[in-house]
Amino acid sequence: MKRVVIIADCIDTQNAGIQAYTRNMIDALSMLPDIELFCVRIKSPNNDILKNQIVVKPVLPFLIKEPFRLFFKLPSVIRKLKPDIVIEPAHMGPFNLPAYIKRVTVIHDLTPIKFPQWHTWFSATLQRLLLPNILQKASMIITNSNNTSSDLADCYPFTKDKIFRIYPASDTYYSIKPNEPISAKAHFFLSVGTLEPRKNLNMLLDAYLLFRQKSEYTHKLIICGATGWKNQNFFKKLNNHPFRNDIELKGYVPKEELKELYKTTAAFVYPSLYEGFGFPVAEALNCNATCFVSNTSSLPEVGGDSVFYFNPDSAEELFTLFVAAASESLPAKNKCHNAFTIESFSKELGKAIQSLQ
């Protein structure tokens, strides 16, 4: 029996892909035999996650609360649990752990290192300062795609022999059940993602402008996602858009509403410039959505031959796809259902944990 602690702070602090990843990791680890799992988090326990939950709340002012928690409070709690393994899904887990504890850190992407201009100065600088030491101390580094594995090995060659690529599980909530009725497609395009530079939303607005100016169709554009950072240019472009009244910014939407949007959109659009994985693509595919996806980074691994790819620097390519979707003239694509299952995620995690001696 191996005792495993997972640092699950992001369940309480995030509404993006890393929150879904951590929840799925907890579920996947719970499926494994011979694992005693403990979940350490910031807020009060929620019984839908795990029985063994330990809350370690920050108690100091903002600027010093997180370092104090990472360097002192969390290590103290973890030492008392005497785990064999500590898993850090957000790769910024506790410091000062005893050497006998195996550390497994998860790297979702290398954007702060490869593209610091897409992040705040503080965030990019913090990652550059801390990440090398975190990677050095890790017994194993889990990545979410071959693309992330390659980027990690390129940026930090010493990690090459510690990388274990495990595709994450897509949220089963977005899977279409066998008896679930097929939804009629509505006249709107859908994009999902945090409003930040690498999501390439300015190009999306350009493509939508071409679509409305050069075609007879009047499909609306719906954008879902938390506000994010460095998005002033996007909001300026949005507010000056000639078809602003047909562009709806929904912010973060609950799962029930998002699933219905996936099921009814004329096409789901993911114009991102770089992704470590790309959860919305997997979710949209599981909802039978027609998908237009950037041909960059990890996205071909997620979309396979089930999506239509475009150059994220070309508004004209995306415009052409918009017109084809609106006119219902797209060629058929292989439907991809549940390609990234919780069972597969659990199986690969089990192999990884067993390999730690």
Image: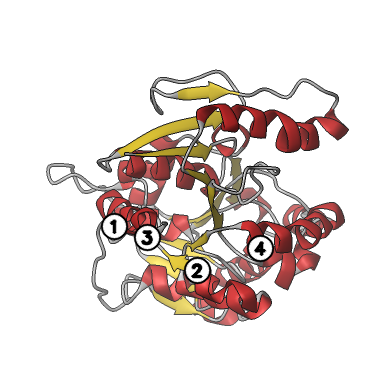
The amino acid type found where label 2 is placed reads Ile
User: Regarding mark 1 in the picture, which secondary structure is present there?
Assistant: loop
Give the spatial CA distance, label 3 vs label 1. 37 Å
Residue highlighted by disc 2: 163
Dot 1 surroundings within 10 Å: few (below 14), some, or many (20 or more)?
Answer: many
Residue highlighted by disc 1: 288
The amino acid type found where label 3 is placed reads Ser
Could you say which is closer to the camera, residue 267 or residue 186? 267
Q: Earlier in the sequence, mark 2 or mark 4?
A: 4
Could you say which is closer to the camera, residue 210 or residue 332? 332
In the image, farthest residue toward the front: 100
121 over 5 or under it: above or below = below
- Report the residue at 55% width, 18% height from top: 44
Dot 3 surroundings within 10 Å: few (below 14), some, or many (20 or more)?
Answer: few
Residue highlighted by disc 4: 136
Q: Nearer the viewer, mark 4 or mark 1?
A: 4
Q: Nearer the viewer, mark 2 or mark 4?
A: 4
Residue highlighted by disc 3: 355
Give the spatial CA distance, label 3 vs label 4. 18 Å
The amino acid type found where label 4 is placed reads Gln
Give the spatial CA distance, label 1 vs label 2. 33 Å
* Left or right for 338, reference 88: left
- Report the residue at 47% width, 24% height from top: 53
Give the spatial CA distance, label 2 vs label 4. 12 Å
Residue 326 seen by the camera: no
Could you tell me which quadrant the N terminus lies in?
top left
- Report the residue at 33% width, 44% height from top: 28
User: Regarding mark 2 in the picture, which secondary structure is present there?
Assistant: strand
